[in-house]
Amino acid sequence: MDNRRDFFALMGATLMAAGAQPASAKVMDAVKASPESQTLEFPFGVQQIYYQGPTDMLAVFEGGNLRLNPGMVPHPPHQHPEEEILLITEGTGEISVEGKMTQVGPGSMMFAAGNTLHGIKNTGSEPMLFYYFKWAKKS
């Protein structure tokens, strides 16, 4: 098994151990405050998952945030079938999309279509907070 698969297997096991909502549970209408999210602590930072699962229109939806520690990456550049948006609200860093590196700060937003190689790194001296949204349509 390659390192990326090992990492995602470990992430999945960690999410389940931390009580993450099963991906099969439908996302319900709600407004959630930070304390209501699923909070997961990793060496690279703290992740909060607000919504995770299918919706009436989507096979997969996930919305949350990550407070990324200085100098850290949550994982190597990767790709997945879901489309994804990242919105930087605090700190500075760089985002790569298909190998093109862009310097980012508060107000920067990334869109990556499904199966697009992308990654993020905190290059600043303070934590970088970004919100992410991922989705894939039903077949």
Image (cartoon, rainbow, N blue to C red):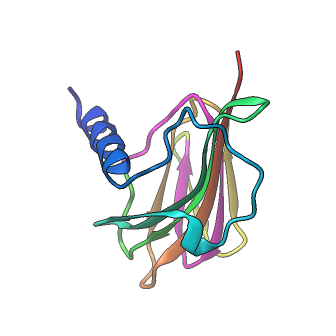
Q: Is residue 96 toward the left or the right of residue 15 in the image?
A: right
Tell me where residue 31 appears, x and y as whole percent. 75, 64
The N terminus: image quadrant: top left
Asked whether 89 or 18 is in front, the reply is 18
Instruction: Identify which residue is drawn at 75% across, 57% down.
Output: 30
Asked whether 50 or 108 is in front, the reply is 50
Q: Quadrant of residue 40?
A: bottom left
Q: Quadrant of residue 10?
A: top left
Tell me where residue 106 appears, x and y as whole percent. 67, 75
Instruction: Identify which residue is drawn at 39% across, 74% down.
Output: 69
Asked whether 134 or 97 is in front, the reply is 134
Q: Is 3 located above or below residue 123 in the figure? A: above
Asked whether 81 or 23 is in front, the reply is 23
Q: Is 78 located above or below residue 114 in the figure? A: below
The C terminus: image quadrant: top right
Look at the image and give the residue range highlighted in magenta: 76-97
